[in-house]
Amino acid sequence: MSPLSSAGIPSHFARPKNSASSPDRSQTEPSRTALILAHQCHPFERPSSRMGAQRAYQFAKWLPLYDWRAEVLCSPHLSLASPLPLGPSLILPLREGPPGRRHRAWVALSHRKRWDARLVRGVLTFTLCNDGDWSRGWRSAATEAALARIRLGLRGELPRIDLVIGEHSPDAGLLAGADVAHASGLPFVTDFRDPVLAGYRGPVRWRYRKVIAKTIEKASAVINVSEEWAKADAALSPGTPAFGIPNGFDPDEFRDGTPDRETFSVALTGNVVRAGFHVEWLLDSISRLQSQGSCPIELHYCGLFGAEVRRRAEKAGVNHLLKDFGLLDREEGLNRLAASSVVAYPTWSPDSSPEAFSSGAPHGKIFDYITARRPIICFPGDRGEASKIVDLVQSAFIADSPSALLSRLSSLYMSWCRGELRTPEEVSSLPLRLSRVGGAAAMADVLDGVLERHGA
């Protein structure tokens, strides 16, 4: 039996035994294999890609419950280079080839502020678009390794590869996946983590759109973390089926829900200083609480933007309450969240979100907050994808104004002072579709459908 099949998963995370897509837990090995090309994959990711790198990892871990195993080709960070077995699945890091001259020049100009340097870099960006984004150096190595792996399956030396999945963000996995599928004749599925054209402007957007449209034309299905984003990406090649599969929480990672009892602490993580976010609402609320309350209060920040958070905290008069833990690894980060009293979750408001995120932005970190089992205050709420997820979690709340945020935080603070702050719900009470197990089930349904349409 697969190690994943005996992981003690609550029964409601498995599909019914009599379902056509129910996992057969009596099998020693899954009968189908997906080859996933993902430049960034946990635990080999760069620190700045920590959240997005969970995507390929979660499918590799949980797909075997649904008769699929996954082999992930990724790029290693620093010295991490040994293959990682994950039950019947495998994560294999591949070294990148040396960057070309144009790419080296593009990197060298990235920190220069002069107008002529920016102009030359813009021209280089335009000319490099056909090869993808900054991850292009890994594309050829991944393509070569993937085709070699497929040949081994055809010769019967390893399990046969049934289809190829190309992961986006960055895009080397996406473009290499399309190359591999075209060369091998295997079905191809794209998996995006955000709207693919977000952040591109002018001539670069026009050119890159053509590159991505040709890639999606080769795909049998387009997947994104939300259905709206999947439809937007699939619209680049009309007629391609689109599916939304959220990142989800991992039930194996759930914490025990026991916070630090000595100080009321508010956790804040990641890039909370984006344009359109209202972190000042939170800082002002904390300032009022610490001047009116009798219990100790602190703000705990984890991430890469501690200097800017500290600058804003100083402006709000709460710099002395801020503890900056910097960028923590995943386990440390989850433990830090679990030790907090409350987690603050800033989002764009409907009138401040960038155009690409007009339907809302389901940030992957909301699932880490759920995993930590602490009350969550989302502010101001996007009235879209993020708000929909928050509404499904009993211990999460939306504060759509500064006064609503102060009121909710004050209520939780007073409950904590009285020793009455309750622990959020157990994993078994949360909706299936918010879990990574549910995500794997949805992915298996998509892959099964692709193979059926291809007559496999």
Image (tube, rainbow, N blue to C red):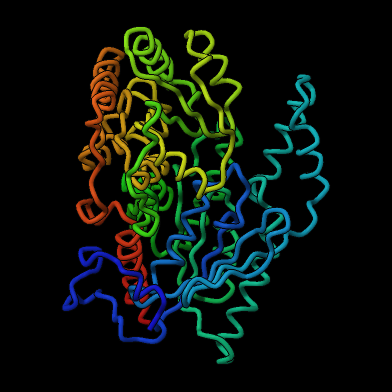
Considering only vertical position in the picture, is 69 above or below 413? below
For the point 72% across and 54% down, which residue is it?
A: 78
For the point 55% across and 92% down, which residue is it?
A: 156
Q: Is residue 430 left or right of residue 159?
A: left
- Quadrant housing residue 266: top left
Return the x and y of residue 225 as percentages of the image width and height: 38, 49
Return the x and y of residue 248 as percentages of the image width and height: 35, 52
Position of the N terminus by quadrant: bottom left
For the point 67% across and 45% down, which residue is it?
A: 134
- Quadrant housing residue 410: top left
Return the x and y of residue 427 as percentages of the image width and height: 26, 53
- Quadrant housing residue 445: bottom left
For the point 79% across and 22% down, which residue is it?
A: 116
Q: Residue furthest bottom?
A: 156
Return the x and y of residue 8 as percentages of the image width and height: 31, 69
Position of the C terminus by quadrant: bottom left
Considering only vertical position in the picture, is 320 above or below 245? above
Count of picture labels? 0
- The one nearer the camera, 335 or 307, is 335
- The one nearer the camera, 261 or 265, is 261
- The one nearer the camera, 12 or 444, is 12
